[in-house]
Amino acid sequence: MRKVFSFTLIFLSVSLFLFAQDAPIRPGITGGAGTDALNAAEEFRLGVHAYNRFAYNEAILSFERALSFRPGEAIILDWLGRAYYRSGFEETAIRQWRAALDIYGRNSGAGMLLASRIETVSNRRFLLPVADDEVRYVEAGRYPGKYQDIVLYRQPSSVLPNSDGSAWVVAYGSNEIVKIDVNGIVRDRKRGPLNGFDRPYDLVRGLDGRLYISEYRGSRVSILDADGNWLSYLGSRGLGKGQFVGPQNLAVDEDGYLYVVDYGNRRISKFDPDGAFILSFAQKSAVFPGMLSPTGIAAGNGKIYAADNAAKAIYMFDPNGSYLGQLSAEGLKSPESIRFLPDERLLVADANRILLIEPDSAIVRELGLAGNEKVRVTGANIDGNGNILAAKFQNGEVAVMSRFDDLASGFFVQIRNVYAERFPVVTVFFTVEDRLRRPITGLDVNNFLLTEGGMDAQEQIFLSPGYRSGGADISLLVERSSVTAGMRGEFSAASRDIRAALQEMGNSKVVSVISAGAQPRREQHEPSLENAVRGTDNSFSPRWRFDQGLRLCATDLLSAAPKRSVVYIGSGEVGELAFEQYSLSELSSYLANNGIVFNAVIIGSGQASASIEYLCTATGGKAAHLYQPQGIGPLIKSVADKPCGLYSFSFTSRLPTDFGRAWLPIEIEVYLMERSGRDSTGYFPPLE
């Protein structure tokens, strides 16, 4: 007995010594080996476990208790800040991080990493939208058309980004389209039907996902499926209706109509989504001088914008081809491609310049230069990571242009949680974003370095990234106000449309239905989603709680699929008690910091309030009326198309566990062209 007791004392003494000396296997809580230190370590361990299973409130309580035993411990303050950040309380999180930084010291490794996190989170909370800043784009990399003596593609004329971060590049000179990933690696190439493409020039995507590609020398448009496989032709060579002579640039409007710039005939032809010819316009008339050298075209917001590089002008038409006037954008040199951006502005390739033009005011801003004055950019577009991809026709390459501030700040990498229940096999989940919270997609195993305890993690497996997720999980927030009490029929209709959209998407489901009444509660939504959404007469109240309902909705999605959304169904007005417990900014941060999109389905005759619009904008969602012409199906399906910067690795740990009480440090580093970022954390294995 005495030997066992002595051995126990020796083991405990050694453990406490390692604890006090901040050994690598310990969480870094220092300052003695007494009861307070032991209690702090245990609460810290419990807090980390709670954090990794998304129980952020529980984690906060554990970290607060740990601080009560060991006030001023940097690592506890750091993790307390992480838990507050995930809970949406960014102000409180920053206070904890700043306190931890004072203790770490700015020159320490942990201090420099924490200082970068504080700066990123603080700045983006006050940044103006991207559209309104004056940041310039600079070349951060390129997709070369030639590698050593190997020709990858020739004379790129246009670029079409994909949702996974890759892009289709139209190779005019080599008669093909090539799919290039974010690292510049060619992943696929398509050459059309048996007889091949004949000088392909521009490529656009229809609303149904099909692709349209113009063939300049072939005088036709090829229709491809979403993967680039050839389906059929549209049009033929000639001067008649629906015929072309050298078709070049293309555009698709918000209703799915295709517009083709017929360069040889100096006109624009319009086709319906099925390829049937409708009309031609932009020829010389009593009110319009006619196109001299038609090039770029864009369609959106009920207008058609067409460029003429000989006239150095951009003209405006309505969808019926009626001339509306000239967009008085001054200083154009040789406008080529035009792309209509989601924020209703025009991205224009003008000689070697990339321009941003406000259609309403005609204000022109130069975003950046894609080379010297001899460079000709024939096509430019913005990819899923916010970069401008510029096709440099004569140089035989695509320039990747990034915001200068993004290059300086690097990536914002956050280890979201560590799953160690199958230890020694461990799975680490992390997100990669830019400084404005936009997810970085398209990365693969070559972009990451994962280490454990300062050494390469063993038996690493790169798991399927979030951007490849084909489905989505949603949680429904149903307004139970006095206003919506008489709209139960519309609730039923909304539920049916949502169910139908999810079935079409595949691999998608409703996680929960929250009745936002006076006391929000979860509804039983299986087997009848309609009954759950429709509610009962006594579930409606003038004192309904939007904030509590939304919080409950979002919490249900924390462990859901990588792509997830809260879908609010209601009148659009959030009520007098909307933000009694949680503020609007706290709610939006809770959603955004956990990768949850907020979408709104408006029933009745109301409009989305400013609060609803704010939540949509802050999280990348939208508001739509239930009975809009296209229905709410596209809104629901859009969740699966959202960019996602969630990544994960599994590995086999080789570190000693101390029976589940050892602190096992890990770090992830991310590299892409000229940008990088990293995050470090640690975890506890299960108790033995």
Image (cartoon, rainbow, N blue to C red):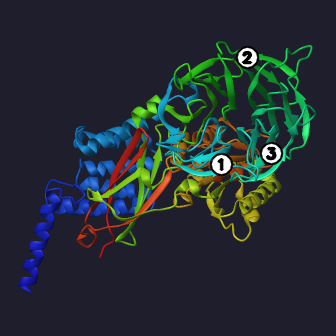
Residue 170 at x, y percent in the picture: 66, 40
| Residue at image coords 81%, 53% | 490
Q: Secondary structure at mark 1?
A: loop
Judged by depth in the image, the label closer to the viewer, 2 or 1, is 2
- Residue 158 falls in which quadrant of the image? top right
Circles 2 and 1: CB distance less than 8 Å?
no
Residue at disc 2, secondary structure: loop
Residue 310: numbered disc: 2
Q: Is residue 352 above or below residue 663?
A: above
Q: Is residue 603 left or right of residue 61?
A: right
Taking the image as shown, residue 345 lies to the left or right of residue 618, namely right
Q: Position of residue 479 (x, y in %)?
A: 69, 51
Secondary structure found at label 3? loop
**Label disc, if present, on residue 604 of the rendered structure:** 3
| 404 vs 373, nearest the viewer | 373
Which of 154 and 303 lies nearest the eye of the viewer? 154
N-term mark: 2 or 1: 2
> Is residue 259 in view from this perspective?
yes
Q: In 3D space, how far apart are the residues under numbered discs 2 and 1 (Cα atoms)?
A: 64 Å
The residue pinned by badge 1 equals 543
Q: CA distance from mark 3 to mark 2?
A: 51 Å
